[in-house]
Image: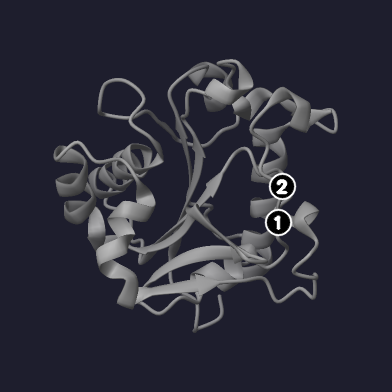
Amino acid sequence: MPSSLPNIGIIILAGGEGKRMGGVDKGWCLYQETPMIVQVLGALETQYQSLYGEDASRPFFISANRNLSDYQALDYPVISDKRPGFCGPLSGIESVFNAGQVRALKIDRWITYPVDSPIVPQDYLERMALVKSDRFGVWRAGSRSHFVNLSLPSGVLPEITQYLNFGNRSIKGWLTPRSQQTDFVSSLSGLSDDQTSSFLNLNSPSDLA
């Protein structure tokens, strides 16, 4: 492992209601004839092995609230939200952080990725892993910031829990008071800012066509 890279944990966010998809579990929607969860995991696994070596343990977690046995069949820990109902991706992040503490994992930085973006930027993990230890990272593609794509220091669990306990859900809202500590991270793979297809976000059945 390159000395400049921290120990990372990777959270695949697949716990949403899928309202704009008609209530289906987006992780199992087919894109180019393959479930999106399979595409996302495959791309991130390849990047992780390239950065940390093929023999490195793969600290992947799937945040999911439905079809749990199907996700578990992918051979990664599946963590459901500890809060009742669908409280948004920040609740899923909180639950995985808690699971990481229970398992005494040595994670310096957590990186999130939503299951409904099946085309993963080729340098996503490396760019997000290199965010400085005391800062927050948000992915930016072109002119758009993707607040569900995060790079977080491992010590922020109490802040997330406090924010959620007040009934808040918005990741952007949680980060607003931390704007001076937030870096916006972009790909260096040479893709044009106008190539919106390089970072698809699929929210409706028509997007899958």
Is residue 56 something that shows in the picture? yes
**Along the line of sight, which residue is nearer the eye, 37 or 70?**
37
In this rendering, would 49 be left or right of 98?
right
| Residue 78 x %, y % | 45, 31
Image: 21 above or below 148: above
Pointer 1 residue: 46
User: Earlier along the polypeptide chain: callout 2 or callout 1?
Assistant: 1
The amino acid on which the numbered mark 1 sits, given as a three-letter code, is: Thr
Pointer 2 residue: 200
Residue at the spot x=24%, y=41% of the render? Answer: 168
| Residue 34 x %, y % | 79, 30
In this rendering, would 158 be left or right of 139?
left
Image: 159 above or below 65: below
In this rendering, would 36 be left or right of 83?
right
- Mark 1 secondary-structure assignment: helix
Q: Please tell me how crowded label 1 is: few (under 14), some (14-19), or many (20+) other residues with Cα within 10 Å.
A: few
